[in-house]
Image (cartoon, coloured by chain):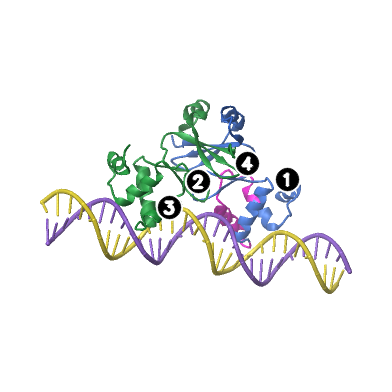
Chain colours: A green, B blue, C yellow, D purple
Amino acid sequence: MKTPAQHLTEKSVKVTAQRAAVLEFLQGNRDHPSPDEVYRKVHKRFPYISRATVYNTIKTLVKAGMLQEVLIQQDKTRVDPNVSQHHHFKCLRCGTVKDMPYALMTADHVRKSLKNYQVKEVRMVVEGLCKQCR
Amino acid sequence: MKTPAQHLTEKSVKVTAQRAAVLEFLQGNRDHPSPDEVYRKVHKRFPYISRATVYNTIKTLVKAGMLQEVLIQQDKTRVDPNVSQHHHFKCLRCGTVKDMPYALMTADHVRKSLKNYQVKEVRMVVEGLCKQCR
DNA sequence: TAATAGTTTTAGAATTAGTCTAAGCACCAT
DNA sequence: ATGGTGCTTAGACTAATTCTAAAACTATTA
């Protein structure tokens, strides 16, 4: 199993303690936290990290293709370490966000119907109640 | 053709000059403006209206089912006077947002694949280049 | 008509997420 | 060591939105 530092190196991102800490926190996190939540959580363990660095690092890692920013909540960005194509489910009661298979709706499917547009990507959010809340 | 005031009355929303002005601006508007854009535009014609009132009015009209708030841009809400079920297209170059038919992807379609969830609604955003920009 | 209660509107303060800035550090290659 | 590049930092700043408390309306009752 690779360390955060190894992942950074692989993607040609310079390794720093701060970047490794942010990446370590996000890898394996399934909560789609906001950048500010990332800051608060990481800051608890590594009080030497600043808010600006967390925001910068997230931007850097998004550019490097190691994270995705997801549009599922109006007021704050949510960060997703799952960079494969996929959709999201949002529970209307508990607010949990879960990843959903991309096959539910693909860009190819939409291309067939929308001849006038050049379709690059499709993003879907399914809203409802999750297993626990239904 | 009904006046904004008539529409408000139909939905049991008390008629005020401010509400009528906001509704009049939004009806027939296809730009999906943000609340602040609504304020700026309406304020030009009716300088007696305040920012807070525009925000309040939009909330009121959303509750009354006369407007929809759409999640297509992270930093600001967009308001849509089209309250029928539909999806959206966002041009990556010019930023225009266009309404898309709901049939592209329906809640029913998703329900068949997601047995563990109680699906209430699906929202899709198609990204690419519009007719003008492609 | 006058008093009252309940809404709506208002200006501006407050909040929140996120960006910017300018200075200080760290590390690498000369 | 020296210089350069890029990284980190605290705190100021911005933009959208919400909150607040008072003023203005509206409808209703006395």
Circle nearer the viewer, 3 or 4: 3
Write the start and end of the magenta stretch as one range.
B23-48
Q: Are marks 4 and 2 in contact (CB under 8 Å)?
A: no
Distance from Cα at disc 1 to Cα at disc 2: 32 Å
Q: Pointer 4: residues within 10 angstroms few (<14), some, or many (20+)?
A: some
Q: Is residue B100 above or below residue B6?
A: above
Pick the residue in front: A61 or A2. A2
Q: Earlier in the sequence, mark 4 or mark 2?
A: 2
Which residue is the site of mark 1? B2
Q: Earlier in the sequence, mark 1 or mark 2?
A: 1
Q: Secondary structure at mark 1?
A: loop
Residue type, numbered disc 3? Lys
Q: Is label 4 on the same chain as label 1?
A: yes
Q: Earlier in the sequence, mark 4 or mark 1?
A: 1
Residue type, numbered disc 4? Asn
Circle nearer the viewer, 4 or 1: 4
What residue do we see at 69% from left, 48% from top?
B64
Please provide percent x and percent y for residue D26: 77, 61
- For disc 4, the chain is B
Q: Quadrant of the N terminus of chain B?
A: top right
Distance from Cα at disc 2 to Cα at disc 3: 26 Å
Which residue is the site of mark 4? B82
Image mark count: 4
Q: Secondary structure at mark 3?
A: helix
Is B28 colored magenta in this rendering? yes
| Res B73 label | 2
Distance from Cα at disc 4 to Cα at disc 1: 16 Å
Which residue is the site of mark 3? A41
Distance from Cα at disc 3 to Cα at disc 1: 54 Å
